[in-house]
């Protein structure tokens, strides 16, 4: 097993055992695994991404930490499908509006959340002069971030 796999497994075990959220110190983790902090950065950047159902944040400085939150524990497969296959790297305005309606209909988000999401990715919100392909890529990124934020909140409420 490669070091990256070992670090990933270690972090995932910590998240599953306790709560859907864990705070780690990058340097302490690097010291534990006898590796450079950049190896920890690599694992976080490639394996704990929104596309994998995780939100990471960090605070730099003396008492700095890395916070990793696993969103949507019970609907992980559904989340993976939404983020990677349904939304992907590009999302048209029509598809985004339809997806918002579906999410509300399936009670994955509230009607109010669906309205806000639809407004944030609407043609009016992205009316800047840029190619449609850029708008669709931006729309997909915005939609993913909103969906992850909603799921993160729901996970915390149910956690």
Image (cartoon, rainbow, N blue to C red):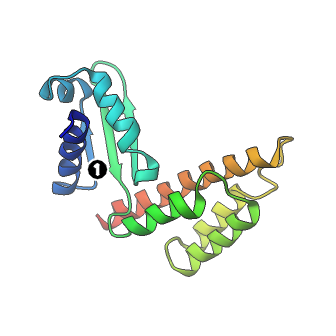
**Rendered image quadrant of residue 18:** bottom left
Residue at image position (40%, 54%) is 53
Indicate whether 27 appears above or below 71: above
Q: Secondary structure at mark 1?
A: strand
Residue 115 x, y percent position in the rendering: 66, 67
Query: What crowding class fits label 1: few (fewer than 14 Cα within 10 Å), some (14-19), or many (20 or more)?
Result: many
- Number of numbered callouts drawn: 1
Residue 80 x, y percent position in the rendering: 44, 61
Residue furthest out toward the bottom? 105
Indicate whether 56 appears above or below 79: above
Where the C terminus falls, by quadrant? bottom left
Where the N terminus falls, by quadrant? top left
Q: Looking at the picture, tell me which residue is in the foreground, 3 or 23.
A: 3
18 on left or right of 152:
left
Q: Looking at the picture, tell me which residue is in the foreground, 135 or 60.
A: 135
**Circle 1 residue:** 21
**Rendered image quadrant of residue 47:** top left
Residue 49 x, y percent position in the rendering: 42, 45
76 on left or right of 121:
left
Residue at image position (44%, 69%) is 78
């Amino acid at each position: 097993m490669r070091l990256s796999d070992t670090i990933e497994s270690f972090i995932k075990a910590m998240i599953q055992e306790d709560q859907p959220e864990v705070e780690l110190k990058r340097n302490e983790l690097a010291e534990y695994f006898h590796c450079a902090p950049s190896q920890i950065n690599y694992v976080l950047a490639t394996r704990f991404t929104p596309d994998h159902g995780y939100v990471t944040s960090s605070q730099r400085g003396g008492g700095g930490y890395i916070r990793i939150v696993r969103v949507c524990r019970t609907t992980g497969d559904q989340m993976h499908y939404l983020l990677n296959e349904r939304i992907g790297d590009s999302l048209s305005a029509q598809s985004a509006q339809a997806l918002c309606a579906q999410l509300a209909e399936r009670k994955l988000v509230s009607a109010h959340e669906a309205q806000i999401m639809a407004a944030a990715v609407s043609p009016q919100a992205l009316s800047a002069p840029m190619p449609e392909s850029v708008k669709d890529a931006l729309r997909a990124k915005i939609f993913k971030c909103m969906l992850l934020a909603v799921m993160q909140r729901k996970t915390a409420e149910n956690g």
